[in-house]
Image (cartoon, helix red, strand yellow):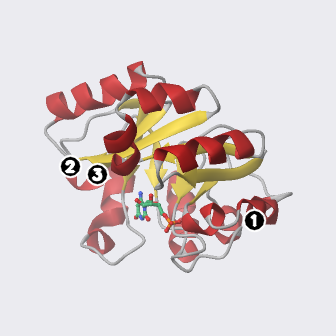
């Protein structure tokens, strides 16, 4: 198993083919709006049969509504869901929740991300930019191994395969780079998560 989570921002049929092809080779799959619009919420259960599923709806609402959305995708079999860190301090919290604290593109998070990760409380981990490994190193120093770090931005957004892992991430999230050529998952052979073995 390579420490890669494949972002399935593709059509339903293509996603199912890719999941069957890569299920033994990657740590999990990330599902976003596009696939849920096309396949309905049951697509979460369908893909969960083949591996760990992270649902990336970038939830951003008051905690009681955010929790309702998150509970629905967890009930369908997802391991976890991503919420926006700007909700801090009114974040939903829990073992299933990844908090997006800094993005792969420039945003206002660049000014506050450290404040978010230092104060967040009981959650599963953070989404931090894999195309900026220097920030992954800083985050891992601050966090120790208390939280998972998963990192998009590899390949199409400029990050080099493996650099975020070597800087302290547990898993790299990869979309287009692997979708275009699934054999590229071999580029992660021999790499290991920094702290956690499951997403
Ligand atoms: O900051 C973020 N950047 C980002 O690209 C947070 C994310 N969740 N993502 C997601 O990672 C994005 O929505 C997409 O699903 C994936 C990156 O895809 P690709 O650039 O590897 O194709």
Lower position in the chain sequence, tag 3 or tag 1 = 3
> Ligand 1: which quarter?
bottom left
Residue 168, position as x, y percentages in the image: 64, 60
**Which quarter of the figure is the N terminus placed in?**
top right
Residue 26 seen by the camera = yes
Alpha carbon distance from label 2 to label 3: 6 Å
Task: Name the secondary structure under disc 1.
Answer: helix
Q: Is residue 66 above or below residue 192?
A: above
| 83 horizontally vs 12: left or right | left
The residue carrying mark 1 has its beta carbon less than 8 Å from ligand 1: no
**Residue ID for mark 1:** 184
Q: Residue at x 29, y 53 (%)?
A: 85
Instruction: Using the image, determine if residue 140 lies above or below residue 49.
Output: below
Where residue 26 sits in the image (x, y, percent)?
A: 71, 46
- Which class describes the residues within 10 Å of circle 1: few (<14), some (14-19), or many (20+)? few
Query: In this image, 103 relative to 85: left or right?
Result: right
Query: Which residue is at the far top?
Result: 75
Q: Are marks 2 and 3 in contact (CB under 8 Å)?
A: yes
Q: Earlier in the sequence, mark 1 or mark 2?
A: 2
Kindly identify which numbered label has been placed on residue 84: 3
Viewer-proximal residue, 197 or 176? Answer: 176
Residue at x 69%, y 70% (from the top left corner): 161
Quadrant for residue 118, please give it: bottom left
Q: Position of residue 176 (x, y in %)?
A: 56, 66
The label nearer to you, 1 versus 2, is 1
Q: Label 3 vs label 1: CA separation?
A: 30 Å
Q: CA distance from mark 1 to mark 2?
A: 36 Å
At x 42%, y 22%, the residue is 76
Rendered image quadrant of residue 120:
top left
Q: Which residue is mark 2?
A: 87
Tell me the element at label 2: helix
Left/right of residue 67 with respect to residue 24 in the rendered view: left
């Amino acid at each position: 198993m390579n420490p890669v989570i494949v972002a399935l921002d593709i059509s339903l049929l293509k996603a199912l083919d890719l999941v069957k092809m890569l299920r033994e080779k990657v740590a999990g799959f990330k599902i976003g709006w596009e696939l849920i619009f096309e396949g309905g919420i049951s697509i979460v259960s369908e893909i969960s049969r083949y591996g760990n599923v992270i649902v990336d709806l970038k939830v951003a609402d008051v905690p009681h509504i955010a929790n309702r959305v998150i509970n629905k995708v967890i009930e369908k079999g997802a391991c976890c869901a991503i919420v926006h860190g700007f909700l801090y301090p009114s974040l939903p919290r829990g073992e299933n929740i990844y908090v997006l604290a800094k993005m792969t593109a420039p945003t206002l998070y660049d000014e506050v991300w450290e404040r978010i990760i230092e104060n967040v409380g009981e959650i599963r981990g953070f989404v931090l930019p894999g195309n900026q490994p220097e920030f992954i190193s800083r985050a891992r120093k601050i966090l120790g191994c208390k939280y998972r770090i998963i990192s998009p931005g590899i390949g199409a957004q400029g990050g080099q395969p493996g650099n975020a892992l070597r800087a302290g991430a547990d898993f790299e999230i990869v979309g287009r780079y692997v979708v275009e050529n699934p054999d590229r998952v071999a580029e992660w052979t021999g790499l290991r998560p920094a702290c956690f073995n499951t997403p």
